[in-house]
Amino acid sequence: MALEGRWLHPVAGPDEVRAPEQVRDEEVLLLAVARGDQAAFAALYDRVGSLVHGIVRRVVRDPAQSEEVTQEVMVEVWRSAVRFDPERGSARTWILTMAHRRAIDRVRSEQASRNRTARVADQQYARDFDEVSERVEVSFEHEQVRGALSTLTDLQRQAVELAYYQGYTYREVAELLDTPLGTVKTRMRDGLIRLRDALGVA
Amino acid sequence: MSQRPDLHTLTGAYAVDALPEEERVLFEAHLAVCGACGQEVQELQATAARLGAASVAGAPAGVREQLLVQIDQVRQERPGPGVDAPVEAVAARRVVPRWVANGLGIAAALLVVAVGGLAVVVASLQGQVADLEVLAGDAERTSAELRTVTERLAELEQQAGEPPVLTSSALTDVLAAPDVITVSVTHDDVLGRVVASPTRGEAVFIAENWSPAPSEHTYVLWLITPDGAVPAGLFDPDEQGRATRVMTGDMARATAIGITIEPEGGSPVPSDEPMMTLQLG
């Protein structure tokens, strides 16, 4: 098959501009994984592993737990690759959506017993976007996203960041920001819509 | 809690995984029938993934090796219908969403197969109606088509003699109840979940990863009460193995929900022990 040699040579690293062929290669790899191709799985891991681990680290924070979750996510990618439908989004979106969900699940079960609201009230939620984790690299994608986030209103940005990066439910976010539930829901939605437009997400 | 949550505005919260578990399940049930929300969620999930991709961190070196060993022992899910030629699917990817491109062709085709599975058709048409509602503002032509489909839907529901498989308002009502409880049971990957409000006596059943019932058979939900089993509705999983069903009957008297396989059309009493039981309270 003509495609075979291609995924041995990554077209671009995850922190470079995403060329269309890179996006397509990830799809081809994931579709090959769905057919049980272990070499394709290895190649896919080489492309998206650091993205998966990046978001998991960001949400879960604890290094040992993050490693576990990253492994779980990738095994899940292997197991359920057949569910990926290219008509409904890119391979990268599919994988990172799964990674985020798993990371959030871990954080929520971990913290179910604690009073998270109190914890955060003490701790001041608003970490600088740059102060992610020591190992997180500053990338082109990072700069783009930071630029896009700066176009949001404070409330939109806080709502999206608290939910996405820190794993709070919208009910918790409403409490933390002392804002009505309905407003928080709406700000999450219109904040993401604005980001979508700023980032040119198709 | 007196205010009815509007499910359509939950797309953002869903895309960043900010819905509590029960609401996520209910919203996913809504997604299955609301084309407009489905489209928006896809876009917002892609946007959220960009937020995720802004953080890059190399996993510890051993992870790759461990994974390659691990996957060798993990059985993959089997392909479902239509997943056979994925590579071609990439090449032929449509820019226009499938539901717009195929539009009413699907609805027409579904009407033809209506004999086989009315419930499924009703669910699909509800999705079509939601889709068409979005377009209604754009073209008069569309509103005529929308009327046709809506009429067909009403007809089919009447023929089916069953309440609609799912209505957003029923879901919203259960969700908004102050005493909402969720009970889930999983056998292997097969999930059954009941979201119920005892005070309102209402419940929604949600199925994930169910195989189709044997031919000329259907799944039946039963309320297990002190006086015996009372039928509470039929369901047939869709192609993804999912179903959502507003249950009939008085939930307040039920101590459990049971599921059996019965001949098409259901039975007055269960013909066998339940294949799955969800204990309430």
Image: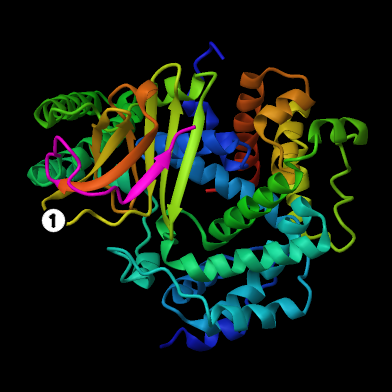
Given residues B196 and A138, the one toward you in this image is: B196
User: Magenta stretch?
Assistant: B263-281
Horizontally, residue B29 falls left or right of residue B125, namely right
| Amino acid of disc 1 | Ser
Residue A4 higher or lower than B133, as above or below: below
Residue A82 falls inside the magenta stretch: no
- The residue that label 1 is drawn on is B215
Q: Chain of mark 1?
A: B
Q: Position of residue B155 (x, y in %)?
A: 11, 26
Number of dots carrying numbers: 1
Q: Quadrant of the N terminus of chain B?
A: top right
Residue at x 37% of width, y 48% of height: B96
| SS under mark 1 | loop
Q: Position of residue B116 (x, y in %)?
A: 10, 47
Q: Quadrant of residue B168?
A: top left
Residue B266 falls inside the magenta stretch: yes
Residue at x 58% of width, y 35% of height: B12
Main SS of the magenta segment?
A: loop
Residue A111 higher or lower than A10, as above or below: above
